[in-house]
């Protein structure tokens, strides 16, 4: 067990809090579907649109392959400790598969947020994505966007988002740019 001062644990606990959309301390598949619906609302889409369905499918795969098996006590939900332990195990025992499933989620998420269809996420799209789905502060997100924009071209491409996602969910490096994926923590 790692202490709460561990950077990865702090990031994972933050992710858990964001994923636990009803705040009941237990993560279930329905929480992920709520996130998809929030994203649909943020970008004026219906929950039945093909892009939202693709995100829901990616969430279902992530739930089935990674998150649901973390429910080690069989009570029907993943609690904070199970999530911490399970995410570390997934990144170690099935890193390639885990990152692939996260990548499918990232691709689906980006397709929704890329409102102008240019294949990248600009700062406005990034702000909309996280302010309206996760309630993040715009000023924090502007700082985060700048840190994630590794090549400094003013947009985030799929590789920058994938790298940030990998660093956020797997890295203990306190200087990793991906630590800023959801703003400062």
Image (cartoon, rainbow, N blue to C red):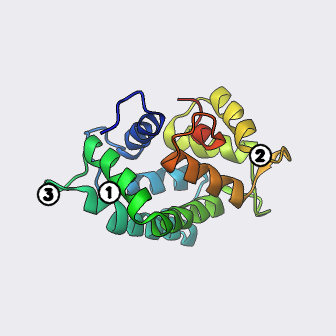
Query: Marks 2/3: CA distance?
Result: 42 Å
Q: Residues within 10 Å of mark 2 (few under 14, many from 20)?
A: some
Vertical relation: 99 (above or below) 79:
below
- Which badge, 2 or 3, is on the more N-terminal residue? 3
Residue drawn where x is 14% and y is 53% of the image: 73
Can you tell which quarter of the image residue 62 is in? bottom left
Residue hosting label 1: 30
Residue hosting label 3: 74
Query: Marks 1/3: CA distance?
Result: 17 Å
- Label 3, secondary structure: give it: loop
Query: Marks 1/2: CA distance?
Result: 34 Å
For the N terminus, give its image quadrant: top left
**Residue 74 percent location from the top left of the image:** 14, 57
- Among all residues in the image, which is located at the extreme right? 153
**Residue 83 percent location from the top left of the image:** 32, 48
Tag 2 and tag 3, C-beta contact below 8 Å: no
Does residue 85 appear to the left or right of 14 in the view shown? left
Can you tell which quarter of the image residue 120 is in? bottom right
Residue hosting label 2: 150
Tag 1 and tag 3, C-beta contact below 8 Å: no
Vertical relation: 21 (above or below) 105:
above
Q: Residues within 10 Å of mark 3 (few under 14, many from 20)?
A: few
- Label 1, secondary structure: give it: helix
Does residue 81 appear to the left or right of 51 in the view shown? left
Vertical relation: 131 (above or below) 98:
above
**Residue 118 percent location from the top left of the image:** 80, 62
Does residue 88 appear to the left or right of 136 in the view shown? left
Q: Which of the pair 137/91 is nearer the observer?
A: 91
- Label 2, secondary structure: give it: loop
């Amino acid at each position: 067990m790692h202490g709460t001062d561990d950077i990865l644990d702090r990031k994972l606990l933050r992710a858990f809090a964001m994923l636990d959309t009803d705040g009941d301390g237990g993560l279930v598949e329905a929480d992920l579907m709520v996130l998809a619906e929030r994203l649909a609302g943020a970008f004026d889409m219906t929950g039945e649109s093909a892009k939202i369905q693709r995100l829901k499918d990616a969430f279902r795969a992530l739930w089935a392959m990674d998150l649901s098996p973390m429910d080690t006590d069989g009570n029907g939900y993943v609690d904070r400790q199970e999530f911490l332990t399970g995410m570390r195990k997934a990144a170690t025992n099935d890193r390639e598969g885990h990152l692939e499933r996260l990548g499918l989620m990232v691709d689906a998420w980006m397709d929704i947020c890329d409102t102008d269809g240019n294949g990248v996420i600009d700062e406005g799209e990034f702000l909309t994505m996280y302010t309206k789905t996760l309630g993040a502060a715009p000023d924090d997100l502007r700082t985060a966007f700048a840190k994630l924009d590794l090549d400094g071209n003013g947009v985030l491409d799929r590789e920058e988002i994938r790298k940030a996602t990998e660093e956020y969910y797997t890295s203990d490096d306190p200087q990793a740019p991906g630590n800023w994926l959801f703003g400062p923590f």
